[in-house]
């Protein structure tokens, strides 16, 4: 065996923030002092290594001198503690209006996962996306006009279309926001979402884009150029918190993991 020194490329204030949350959680549930194998700070380091580096839990547990089962327990505990800090959609939209944002951007992303057993009525895999040819969960997210991620939803199985996932998690609140002067921009996957959700006009089937009126093509181009900034929201979360590139935990935890990454992302400096 060879030992070596490594550096976690996460600002120290983020580690301390998570450690404070974990310490408060332990006090809340009445954990006796010195009864845990790891203190809050070392637990925070373990969890942030998993989120940042996408390290396997077995290796993290070995490095920390704990069992793999304890490593998983510490990881799930911290994910839940962080996810509790994520803002609700209504709180995010209220803040957007207070800051006089011109619009918000709605989009969906696939969070890849290991293969999951689960069949739909038609025999297809529930957690398999035919579009991406991969297993995972569909997560809806909201971004500010500059592309900064603001909110993420619970995960739906990857076979769920964006418009269906949005109807479950986002559209009712977005309708109210649009009525109060905060419209939503989205791509063609949300055609039919309703009033207040601006989407490009689809070209007639079997015809080229030139079949659309010039004014319609211009509108589509403007919408795409403004909405494109929202694409960086999911990319920012996935690249900064690499665990989101492929989840090895239960897919039911994808939403909590995405919210945990969102909370940490907001305090990154």
Image: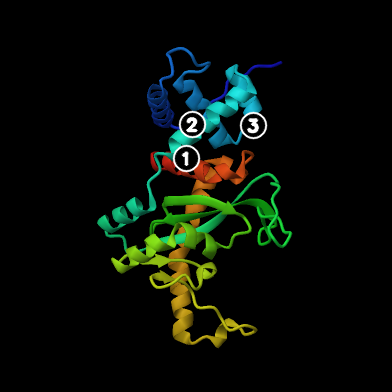
Residue annotated with mark 1: 260
Sequence-first tag of 3 and 1: 3
Res. 211 in view: yes
Disc 2 from disc 3: Cα separation = 16 Å
Tell me the colour scheme of the image.
Answer: rainbow
For label 2, the residue is 78
Q: 127 or 266: nearer the eye?
A: 127
Looking at the rendering, which quadrant does residue 244 occupy? top right
Residue receiving disc 3: 56
Q: Position of residue 54 (x, y in %)?
A: 60, 36
- Alpha-carbon distance for marks 2 and 1? 9 Å
- Tags 2 and 1 in contact by the CB under 8 Å rule? yes
Q: Is residue 269 visible?
A: no
Tag 2's secondary structure? helix
User: Residue shown at 70%/46% (left/top)?
Assistant: 115
Left or right of residue 214: residue 269: left
Spatial CA span between label 3 and label 1: 18 Å
Q: Residue at x 65, y 52 (%)?
A: 127
Q: Mark 2: few, some, or many residues within 10 Å (few <14, many ≥20)?
A: many
Which image quarter is the N terminus in? top right
Looking at the picture, does residue 169 appear above or below residue 41? below
Q: State which mark lies toward you, 2 or 3.
A: 2
Measured as percent of width and height from the top left, residue 215 is found at 44, 84
Query: How crowded is the residue under tag 1: few (<14 C-alpha within 10 Å), some, or many (20+)?
Result: many
For label 1, the SS is helix
Q: Residue at x 48, y 41 (%)?
A: 261
């Amino acid at each position: 065996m060879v030992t070596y020194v490594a550096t976690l490329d996460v600002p120290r204030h983020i580690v301390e923030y998570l450690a404070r949350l974990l310490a408060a959680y332990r006090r809340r549930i009445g954990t006796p002092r010195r009864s845990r194998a790891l203190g809050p700070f070392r637990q925070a380091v373990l969890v942030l290594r998993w989120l940042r580096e996408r390290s396997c839990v077995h290796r993290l547990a070995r490095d920390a001198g704990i069992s793999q089962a304890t490593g998983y327990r510490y990881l799930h505990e911290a994910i839940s503690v962080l996810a509790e800090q994520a803002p609700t959609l209504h709180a995010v939209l209220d803040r957007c209006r207070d800051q006089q944002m011109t619009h918000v951007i709605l989009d969906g992303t696939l969070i890849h996962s290991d293969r999951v057993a689960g069949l739909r009525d038609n025999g297809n895999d529930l957690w398999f996306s035919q579009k991406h040819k991969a297993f995972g969960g569909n997560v809806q997210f909201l971004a500010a006009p500059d592309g900064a991620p603001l909110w993420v939803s619970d995960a739906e199985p990857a076979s769920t279309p964006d418009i269906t996932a949005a109807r479950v998690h986002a559209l009712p609140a977005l309708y109210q926001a649009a009525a109060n002067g905060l419209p939503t921009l989205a791509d063609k996957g949300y055609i039919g979402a309703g009033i207040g959700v601006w989407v490009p006009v689809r070209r007639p089937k079997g015809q080229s884009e030139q079949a659309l009126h010039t004014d319609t093509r211009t509108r589509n181009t403007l919408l795409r150029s403004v909405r494109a900034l929202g694409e960086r929201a999911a990319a920012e979360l996935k690249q900064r918190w690499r665990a989101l590139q492929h989840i090895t935990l239960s897919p039911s935890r994808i939403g909590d993991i995405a919210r945990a990454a969102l909370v940490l992302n907001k305090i990154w400096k």
